[in-house]
Amino acid sequence: MKKNLLLLLIALLPLATQAQGKAINEDGKKIDKEKLEGKDYLPEVHGTIRSKYEYQTEMGAGRFEVRNARISLTGNILPSVAYKAEIDLSDEGEIKMLDAYARIFPLKGLTVTAGQMRVPFTIDAHRSPHQQYFANRSFIAKQVGNVRDVGLTLGYKLPTDMPVSIEAGLYNGSGLTNQKVWHKEVNYSAKAEMFLTKGLNLTLSVQAIQPEDIRMQSYDIGAYYESGRFHIEGEYLYKTYSKNAFDDVQSVDAFINYDLPLKNGPFTKMSFLARYDMMTDQSDAKTTDETTGALVTTDYKRQRLTGGITFSLSKAFRTDLRLNFEKYFYAKHSIAKESEQDKVVLELMVRF
C-alpha cells in the first residue's frame, strides 16, 4: 500500500507543471484577475482567541486559561499560487508554529501543498479551533488522531455529480520540531470525503506514521448529517502497532447539535449539544519502560459524556460562549490525569 501511494503521488506531480488559465484562491474558488492585481492581492489576517475557565469537581479547584491565540496570514502571490502561515501565541501557554505551507492550483480541482500542515485524517481532528462544537476536543481529535506534520499533500475534487474530494500525502512522521532527521520509512495519510446526498457526508481515512522504532497504522470512518437545525455526527478510529508492541486502540466520537434561533437579545442562536466519546489504552509509540524497553500507556482507557449549551452572536462560528459539563468513566486499571476528570468548562471563542 505504501508503494502504491508513493507511485500515485509521483504520477500526479508532473501535473503541477501545467499552468491553468483561471485564478484560484486558497479555498479553491475562482478569483477575478483584475482584483488580484489590486487590493485582493494583499494578505488576509485571521485569528482565533479562546479563553476559558475550568472547575474540576473532583479536586474542588479551578483555573483560567488561554487555550488558543492563533494568528494566520493567507493570500495569493500569483493567480494559482497561495500560501498560509499560522502561529499560536498561547497553546496552553506555549508558542507554537502550526501551519507554514505553499499551495499551487495547477489544474481545475487539483491542489499541491508543501510545508507544515495538519495531515488529512479524520473529521474531528481536522477541525480548526473556531470550528469546534465543544470547548474541549474529542479523544479522536486530541489524543488518538491528532497529527500535524511536514510534508507534501495532493488534493483532488472529482468532476462527478456526487461531490467527492481526495487528499493524500507523504510526511516525515517525526512531528514539527524534528525536521532534520532522515527517514527510511514512508509516512503517509490519505482521506476521502463524499457527499452522498444533500447534508450527508461520509469520510474515510488511513494513516501510517513511525515516530521511532514502532510503526502505527490507523483507520478511520466517520459520517455526519445536517438537516435544518440539526447536526449529527459519528466517527470510529482503529489503530494498530507493528511487532505487536502494544494492544490495538479503538476510539469513538458521537454527538448531536441542535440550533435554536433567538430573535431578541444580543445572541442570534442557542445550541444544545450532547456527546459520547471513548478510547482504549494508547501509547504514543515513543515512551518506553526504562527497565523492559516496552511501550508504556500514555493515555488510559476511559469514556466521557459531555453536555453543553452554546450562545452565538452569528450563525457561523464567529463569537461563541460555551458552557460544558464533562463526566468521565475510567476502567479500574486506568490512571486519570488531573485535566481529564469531571469538570465544568466556560469558554469564550472569538474568530476574526
Image: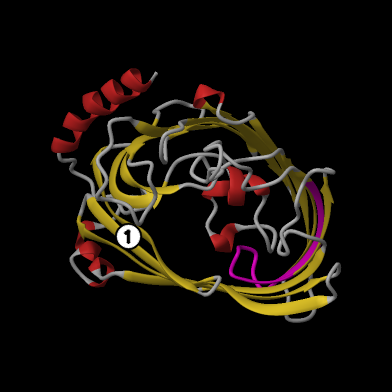
- Snapshot colouring: secondary structure
Tell me if residue 163 is in the magenta stretch. Answer: no
Q: Secondary structure at mark 1?
A: strand
Residue range highlighted in magenta: 303-322
Pick whichever, 29 or 11, lies toward us. 11
Q: Nearer the viewer, residue 163 or 235?
A: 235
The residue that appears at 73% across and 75% down in the rendered structure is 267
Decide if residue 290 is on the left or right side of residue 178.
Answer: right
Is 165 placed above or below 33 here? above
Say if 283 sits above or below 67 in the image.
above
What's the residue at 52%, 57% (across, down)? 128
Residue 50: percent from left, percent from top? 59, 73
In the picture of the structure, the residue carrying the numbered disc 1 is: 84
Instruction: Name the amino acid, label 1.
Output: Lys
Residue 72 in which image quadrant: bottom left
Q: Quadrant of residue 166?
A: top left
Which quadrant is the N terminus positioned in? top left
Provide residue 238's location: percent of width, then percent of height: 62, 30
Q: Nearer the viewer, residue 168 or 162?
A: 168
